[in-house]
Amino acid sequence: MSRWTPRGLVGVLHLPALPGDPRPSGSFADAESHALRDAEALASAGFDALVVENFGSAPFPKGTAGHRIPPHQVAFLALVARAAKRLTGLPVGVNCLRNDGVSALGIAAAADLDFVRVNVHSGAYVTDQGLIEGEADVTLRYRASLGAETVLLADVLVKHAAPLAPLDATQAVEEVLDRGMADAVIVTGRGTGHPVDRGLLAQVREAAGTRPVLLGSGLSPNNAAELAPFAHGAIVGTATKLGGDVRAPVDLSRAKALVEAVRPHLRS
C-alpha cells in the first residue's frame, strides 16, 4: 500500500447507532448499507478520500486504556471501511470516537486502510467523556510494531474539548507534530458542523510550516474562499448531508457543490 498524502476533500461516513448502543438501532446490515450508499455518493461527487466514524454510538467511551470501544464496533468499522475502499477505490481512513487511536490503527492495518484520525494525540483535554490524555507514545509504538504505513492525522485544540492547562495554537501544533510525530494536523470549530475560526487557522498554518493542515469542521461553499486557502485538505460531513443535518444521508447535489466551491481554493 502506497502512503497516502493528506490532501483534498475527505468525506465522512457517519455510521448510525449500532446494536448495543443506547440509541435505537437497526441491524449491522442496515448500518453497512447506510455507509456504503453515502460512500458511493461522495465518490460520485468527486471527493478524494473517505473516513468512517462510529458517530451514532454516542455517548462515546474515552477510547484510552481501559476505556476502548467495544469489540463489535472494532470489527464492524473494519468491515465497513474495507468495503467502502473496495467499492469506491478511494483512500479510506477510520476515526474511533472518542479517542481510540490504538483500535483505529489495528483496524487500518487489518483492513488495508490509508489513515487514521486521533482527536487527542498529545496533552490532556477536558471533554464530555471526562479527562482524556493523549497516547502518542502508545499509538506510535503500536503502529511501528505492525510495520504499518498508516498516516496519522491529529487534531489540535479539538472540538468538544478544552485543554486542561492553557495552550496556544502554536504550542499545540508543535507538540502534535514535533514531539507527537503526527503526520498532519486538523483544525476544528467548537463543535460538529461549526466553522473554524480564521485567526486560529492562520496561527496553525504558520506553526505547521510546510506540513499538512486540514480543516476538520464547518466548511461550506459560503466560507470556502475564506478558509480553504490555509489548508491542504478538509474533512467534511455535515455540509454534504440532506438539509445540512449530520444524521441525514449524503445529498449528491450538495456534495458536488461543495467540491466545486472548495477545491480551487485548497493549497497544493
Image (tube, grey):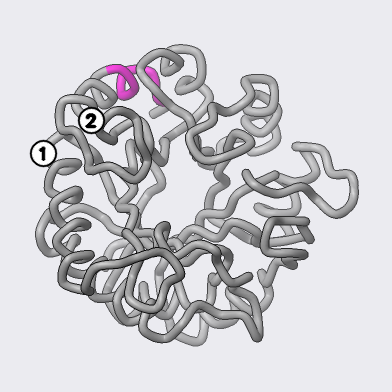
Near mark 2 (Cα within 10 A), the count class, few <14, some 14-19 or many ≥20, is many
The residue under label 1 is: 44
Quarter-of-image position of residue 240: top left
Seen at 19% across and 26% down, the residue is 256
Give the extent of the magenta segment: 261-266
Query: Residue 162 at x, y = what percent?
Result: 76, 47
Horizontal side, residue 197 vs residue 237: left or right = right
Give left or right: position of 112 versus 147. Answer: left
Q: Is residue 254 above or below residue 246?
A: above
Mark carried by residue 61:
none
Residue at 33% in and 70% down? 18
* Quarter holding residue 178: bottom right
Question: Which kind of residue does numbered mark 2 sit on?
Answer: Ala
Nearest to the observer: residue 194 or residue 177: 194
CB within 8 Å, label 1 to label 2? yes
Disc 1: CA contacts within 10 A as few (<14), some (14-19) or many (>=20): few
Horizontal and vertical percent position of residue 98: 56, 63
Q: What residue is pinned by disc 2?
A: 255
Element carrying mark 1: helix
Q: Give the side of residue 13 with respect to residue 205, left or right.
A: left
